[in-house]
Image (cartoon, helix red, strand yellow):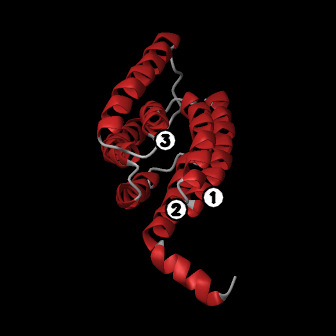
Amino acid sequence: MSVASITAYFAAHGLEAAGMLATVIGIWLTTKRLLICWPVVLAADLLYLVVFYRSELYSDALLQLFFVAFTLYGWWHWWRGVRQEGEVRVVPLPRASMIVAIAAGAVGSILLGVLAVRLHAALPHLDAALTSFSLVASWWGARKHIANWWLWIVVDLVYIGEYIYKDLWLTALLYAGLVGLAILGLRDWRRAAAAA
């Protein structure tokens, strides 16, 4: 690859590259349970909203709107916890809540799939399922449940294949890195929970 072709690629995929960088930084800050993660993640959400809309991954674009809401909620929820407790504490996920969330993810997958088909989205059912379960993982992350990392590992592994198929190579590379960050987050949050 020449410097000119690399430059041309990044010129054509500048938003994707910016979203990738913001996502990596935001998720890394989240693994460290640092409140500053939320404005960085918010920037990533907005950048990827545009990237996915342009790629006709409408469920993923819609997901970014939900991510914006969850990001704002998570920022507020973590900030409130830091103010009251002095740090971001990991919270156990009750089994009943886990079952309800997984069922909601399944129902959301079906409903979003029907909508995505009507919108002529690319990969409508797969994209809808990934979107729905990403919402579950985001909710668990905002609520400070370790289980969010397990779900992100599974969802991100499937996303890698979807993005390769859609020729979003930077995003596929990003999601490979996100799997690693989710493993790091799982490890660090487990340590934090054990130390509490």
- C-alpha span from label 3 to label 1: 32 Å
N-terminal-most mark, 2 or 3: 2
Give me the disc on residue 163. Answer: none
Q: Which mark is residue 87?
A: 3
Q: Nearer the viewer, mark 2 or mark 3?
A: 2
Q: Decide which of tag 1 and tag 2 comes sooner along the chain.
A: 2
Residue 109 lies, in percent from the top left, at 42, 27
Q: Please report the residue visible at 47 percent of the width from the left and 42 percent of the height from the top.
A: 123
Left or right, 163 with respect to 121, comes to right
For mark 1, give the secondary structure.
Answer: helix
Query: In the displayed structure, would residue 109 be above or below residue 172?
Result: above
Residue at 40% x, 37% y is 81
Mark 2 — residue?
A: 20
Q: Which quadrant of the rendered structure holds the C terminus?
A: top right
Which of 171/83 is in front?
171
Residues at marks 1 and 2 touching, judged by CB atoms closer than 8 Å: yes
Residue at (45, 33) in percent of width and height: 125
Furthest toward the top, the residue is 96
In the displayed structure, 142 sits above or below 9; it is above
Q: Secondary structure at mark 2?
A: helix
